[in-house]
Image: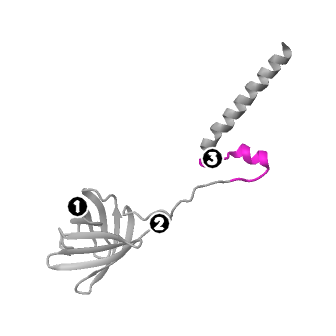
Amino acid sequence: MKPLRRAAAALAGLVVLACGCASSTRYVDAPLELGPADARRTNESVRITPATPAEPVTLVGRWSGTGTQDDGQSWPIVVDVLSSAAGRCATARYPSIPCTADWFCTGTDGDVVVAKEKLRTGAGKCIDNGEMRMQLVDGTLEWSWRGDGQTANAVLHKEDRASR
């Protein structure tokens, strides 16, 4: 009986081995994941990381630049964009005038965000209720404004968090 048991055990082992090999072929195309234990075991430093694209520039954040009116006047502008959703979406400072304002996003026109400006400070120095259009172009924020028969434009640059 012992030889028969050995033969049965060997046959069972071959079946398990064959099943294991057959089922592992399903995973040939799966990504290889190696942990620290695998690196220690092979004495190699193994790091497999997926390629990640550069972080896209988003509208949200602090932007600054120089606004220029159609009459040639220019002034610094600092904008904190909170969102591009409808409602209060940004705050703006015009430090040299001085004026501050809230921007209320009212919609989009393709990839352009449309907003209205409501002054918080500086009434009489800045024009209230102007309409703005903002668009991301090559990592910058192109901004245009019109109100009370005047227009202004700026190309704003995003400030990194470390410079604040």
Q: Nearer the viewer's eye, disc 1 or disc 3?
A: 3
Disc 2 marks which amino acid?
Answer: Asp
Task: Specify whether residue 15 is painted magenta.
Answer: no
> Foreground residue, 122 or 26?
26
Residue 147's place in the image compared with 3, above or below, is below
Give the residue pinned by disc 3. Answer: 28
Give the residue pinned by disc 1. Answer: 107
Residue 98's place in the image compared with 39, above or below, is below
Which image quarter holds the N terminus?
Answer: top right
Residue 119's place in the image compared with 1, above or below, is below
* Residue at the (48%, 67%) spot, across then down: 163
Residue 160, numbered label:
2
Task: Estimate the x, y position of residue 116 in percent, counting from the top left.
Answer: 21, 65
In the rendered view, does 85 fall on the left or right side of 61? left
Q: Examine the residues drawn in magenta and state their main secondary structure.
A: loop
Task: Estimate the x, y position of residue 83 in percent, counting from the top left.
Answer: 32, 58
Disc 3 marks which amino acid?
Answer: Val
Where does the magenta region start and end? 28-46
* Residue at the (22%, 86%) spot, across then down: 71
Task: Estimate the x, y position of residue 56 in percent, counting from the top left.
Answer: 44, 63
In the rendered view, does 86 fall on the left or right side of 158? left
